[in-house]
């Protein structure tokens, strides 16, 4: 397995609107980020991934881009961005941009020009089709619920939008569109950015003729026609050969419904590799079917199976992208951990994924154990997918159940303001009102309080990332799972150049008797990480405390 900087780094994700407000208007911005670069660096990460900073009507908070080459005025100017880029680089932090090219905003000039003049080249930048009489061109449904087609009266035709109505899909089969994408990549790489997180990149190629689906689903009907489309390989290779390979940069592609088998076609190392890594979603479905709106009971066995499959199938061939939170996922403590044992479970969840083989991503607020917001009404939500999915859920389950589901599943849970201190608005802004909610638990859960507490989640993340950085076994070691049948414990070992690491994570508050697997003598290993002070061992094992985690290193 080849060594590389992108494999060794850890990444911190910033969702700019809620990170830190630098100019007191209630909205997070680049000035706010600039003031927090030292903080980000102090975590022990090596890169920042910015969710979209580009000019956007914010219908999907930046994932609807109106201009790929300018900064959203609410966030600052291009000069502000360059100051952040330089400031990050001076501190040894790389900068990864979000590349959103499956769709644009309906306010992008390409889209507007194509409507204005349907004979212009911009018309064919999108998927415009006549209806079948009054019927839409096919039966596809948007990922955000509702039909995937919107009617345009002026030209009497429909356009495709796999996401919000205001996010028309680009027609990637058009070579002009691919040229534009490559120009956008070059623009940012020439400025000095270090790579891209490529938004729903596995959706860019649609099956020819856009056939209707025989399967009905409340959202995303038709997904089998584009989730891994016919020309995906070709287009990704074109981007790589024409642009990416000419820079020292990295890519991580967002890939819903991805399996290891399909992923390996794109990320297997070698000349035909398309992307460095992929964000799959399988491990985010241990408490749901596909995604959190189809809630089920949490199953550790399901989670472990996915982790182990990705670790084993990729090892030595391709590289994993590791995450448990991002701007699309409710807070993981609410899902896989415990509110009662918030601190303990947050640390255990950090160990669970950061000690695996791959590049770890940490989402803003995760490092202090932020949790879901106590929403009490649908009016408090702002995310388009939440509002739409709630509508579907309400019609199927009734208002009360739909709201409970939204509280559990909504992306808005991840988008509340970062809690910096115990002062007004959690120190996120000096404005009277921040643009979005601040969790009332900020008086206790905030960065300042965590800084002062040596046992905080924050300081645990620092220790864990430092350990990873200083021990190649965590980065390059192999992986072997133990106690596969346990419903409560997740245990795995890593091996590298004669060293061994044993990782033990309890997913329950109940005491569980753990005995080390054959070949491990716990008294001979060093307990390098743990979330309780007491790490005593009895007959080569111990009885777990609630959500206990221990990591043993054997040299
Ligand atoms: C990705 C983004 C999400 C966005 C969607 C459409 O899943 O992470 O936030 O809404 O794509 O761009
Ligand atoms: Ca601001």
Image (tube, grey):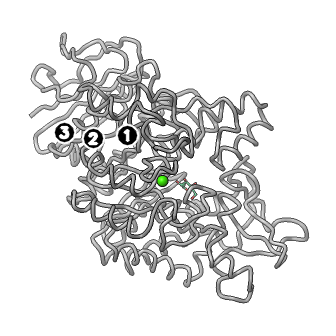
279 displayed left or right of 106: left
Between the C-alphas of marks 2 and 1, the distance is 8 Å
Mark 1 or mark 3, which has the lower sequence index? 1
* Image x and y of residue 116, in percent: 74, 82
148 displayed left or right of 478: right
Q: Relative to the observer, which residue lies in front, 240 or 247? A: 247
- Helix, strand or loop status at disc 3: helix
Q: Is residue 214 visible?
A: yes
- Helix, strand or loop status at disc 1: helix
Q: Is residue 383 above or below residue 82?
A: above
* Image x and y of residue 139, in percent: 78, 60
* Image x and y of residue 319, in percent: 32, 55
- Between marks 3 and 2 in the image, the one whose residue lies nearer the viewer: 3
- Helix, strand or loop status at disc 2: strand
Mark 2 or mark 1, which has the lower sequence index? 1
The quarter of the picture where the C terminus appears is top left
How many C-alpha atoms fall within 10 Å of the one at disc 2: few (<14), some, or many (≥20)? many
Look at the numbered disc 2 and say if its residue's Cβ is closer than 8 Å to ligand 1. no
Mark 3 or mark 2, which has the lower sequence index? 3
Q: Which mark is residue 394?
A: none
How many C-alpha atoms fall within 10 Å of the one at disc 3: few (<14), some, or many (≥20)? some
In this figure, which residue is indicated by the disc labeled 3?
467
For the view shown, which residue lies furthest in the right direction?
Answer: 133
Q: Is residue 327 above or below residue 377?
A: below
In this figure, which residue is indicated by the disc labeled 1?
308
Q: Which mark is residue 479?
A: 2
Q: Are marks 2 and 1 in contact (CB under 8 Å)?
A: yes
Between the C-alphas of marks 3 and 2, the distance is 17 Å
């Amino acid at each position: 397995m080849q060594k590389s900087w992108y494999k060794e780094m850890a990444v911190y994700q910033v969702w700019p609107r809620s990170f830190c407000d630098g100019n007191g208007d209630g909205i997070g911005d680049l000035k706010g980020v600039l003031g927090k670069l030292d903080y980000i660096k102090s975590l022990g990460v090596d890169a920042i991934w910015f969710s979209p900073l580009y000019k956007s009507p914010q219908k999907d908070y930046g994932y609807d881009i109106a201009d790929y080459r300018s900064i959203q005025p609410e966030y600052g100017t291009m000069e502000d961005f360059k100051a952040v880029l330089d400031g990050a680089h001076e501190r040894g932090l790389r900068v990864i941009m979000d590349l959103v090219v499956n769709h644009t905003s309906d306010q992008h000039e390409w889209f507007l020009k194509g409507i204005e003049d349907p004979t212009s080249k911009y018309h064919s930048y999108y998927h415009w089709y006549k209806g079948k009489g009054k019927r839409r061109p096919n039966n596809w449904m948007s990922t955000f619920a509702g039909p995937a087609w919107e009617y345009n009266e002026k030209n009497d035709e429909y356009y495709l939008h796999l996401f919000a109505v205001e996010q028309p899909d680009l027609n990637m089969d058009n070579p002009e569109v691919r040229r534009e994408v490559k120009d956008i990549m070059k623009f940012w790489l020439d400025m000095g950015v270090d790579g891209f997180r490529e938004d729903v990149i596995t959706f860019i190629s649609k099956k020819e003729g856009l056939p209707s689906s025989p399967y009905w689903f409340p959202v995303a009907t038709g997904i089998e026609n584009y989730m891994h489309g016919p020309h995906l390989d070709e287009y990704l290779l074109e981007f790589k050969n024409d642009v990416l390979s000419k820079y020292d940069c990295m890519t991580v592609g967002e890939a819903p419904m991805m399996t290891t088998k399909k992923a390996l076609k794109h990320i297997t190392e070698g000349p035909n590799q398309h992307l460095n890594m992929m964000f799959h979603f399988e491990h985010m479905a241990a408490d749901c079917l596909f995604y959190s709106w189809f809630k089920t009971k949490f199953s550790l066995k399901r989670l472990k199976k996915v982790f182990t499959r990705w670790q084993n199938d990729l090892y030595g061939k391709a590289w994993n992208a590791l995450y448990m939170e991002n701007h699309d996922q409710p807070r993981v403590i609410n899902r896989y951990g415990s509110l009662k044992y918030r601190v303990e479970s947050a640390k255990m969840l950090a160990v669970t994924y950061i000690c695996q083989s791959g590049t770890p991503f940490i989402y803003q607020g995760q490092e202090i154990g932020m949790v879901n917001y106590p929403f009490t009404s649908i009016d408090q939500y702002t995310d388009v997918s939440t509002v739409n999915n709630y509508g579907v859920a309400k019609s199927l389950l009734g208002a009360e159940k739909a709201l409970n589901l939204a509280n559990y599943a909504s992306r808005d849970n991840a988008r509340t303001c970062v809690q910096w201190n115990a002062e007004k608005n959690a120190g996120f802004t000096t404005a009277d009102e921040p643009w979005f909610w601040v969790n009332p638990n900020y008086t206790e859960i905030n960065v300042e309080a965590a800084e002062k507490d040596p046992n905080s989640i924050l300081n645990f993340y620092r220790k864990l990332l430092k350990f990873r950085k200083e021990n190649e076994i965590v980065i390059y070691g192999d992986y072997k799972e133990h106690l596969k049948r346990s419903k409560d414990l997740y245990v795995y070992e890593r091996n590298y150049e004669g060293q061994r690491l044993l990782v033990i994570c309890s997913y329950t508050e109940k005491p569980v008797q753990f005995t080390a697997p054959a070949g491990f003598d716990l008294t001979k290993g060093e307990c390098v990480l743990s979330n309780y002070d007491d790490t005593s061992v009895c007959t080569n094992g111990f009885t777990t405390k609630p959500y206990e985690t221990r990591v043993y290193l054997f040299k």
